[in-house]
Amino acid sequence: MKSTSRLRVATLTILALLAAIILTGCATKPVQLRVLTYNIHHGEGMDGQFDYERLAAVIKAQKPDLVALQEVDNKTRRASGVDQAKVLGDLTGMASVFGVAMAYSGGEYGEAVLTRLPILETRNAPLPYTMGNEPRSALMVRVRIGPRGRSLWFIGTHLDHTRNPADRLAQAREINRLVALESEGLFILAGDLNATPETEVMSTFYEMWTDAAVVAGNPQPTIPSDSPRRRIDYILYRPVEKFRVIEMQVLHEPVASDHAPVLAVLELME
């Protein structure tokens, strides 16, 4: 009986130690997020083809957790009635959210977010614009991350493309205002900001956000995709102390869209 009792105690002790090791490993393992931003040029490639399998392959190859897509058509005549967000979500095996910026060509035009993370909340915030210019929006998706049940706001946007920066500046200020309304939390902002790094638009963002490419030390041009010369696609995050940049790259994909896709791997800090 004593031998059986000792064996039982020893077994329980070993199981407890194993559980502690497993729990410790889970607690200390850092959470990494693979984030992609991609202006898909309403689905039309540089060869004039609407090839969703090709776009999906570009996205899937990076194994992203969060994807911000710009210039997304929803059931427009231009895109032959295709719900592009849903199609790309289905092809990549991710949940899709579409945020309309304006009515266009018998359908809608705007942003989309794809994610493999649990979605907790979505908001589509209209951004200020000058009458006669295209309306814009910021698609905000809150997702659950990591084993501790934390959440993160992922924001995809596409700012005004005209020569006059007034709308872009107003839109940048509005995004900052919307984020400032949240008293705390983790935020990633990704998209085509139609502004190069030295502009007032980006200075406005840099008041609140950190540029992953700058931290990585390798900011690279993103457009045009066949021979990039200007950097207008970004992945930003806040607060700065809660993230570490593991990887940052502009991907070479000269045909699927006129923009190059941009990837960041971000690690969450405790």
Image (spheres, rainbow, N blue to C red):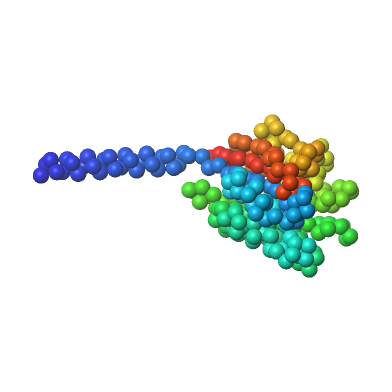
* Residue at the image point whose x is 65% and y is 54% from the top: 53
* Residue at the image point whose x is 60% and y is 59% from the top: 90
Q: Is residue 166 visible?
A: no
* Residue at the image point whose x is 55% and y is 56% from the top: 118
Residue 178 picture location, percent across and down: 71, 53
Which of these two is toward me, 146 or 113?
113
* Residue at the image point whose x is 51% and y is 51% from the top: 149
Residue 209 picture location, percent across and down: 70, 42
Residue extending furthest toward the left? 1
Quadrant of the snapshot with the N terminus: top left
Residue 129, quarter of picture: bottom right
Residue extending furthest toward the bottom? 106
Residue 224 picture location, percent across and down: 79, 43
In the image, taking residue 4 as reference, residue 178 lies left or right, namely right
- 106 relative to 18, above or below: below
Residue 100, quarter of picture: bottom right
Which of these two is toward me, 102 or 185?
102
Residue 62 picture location, percent across and down: 61, 44
- 158 relative to 267, above or below: below
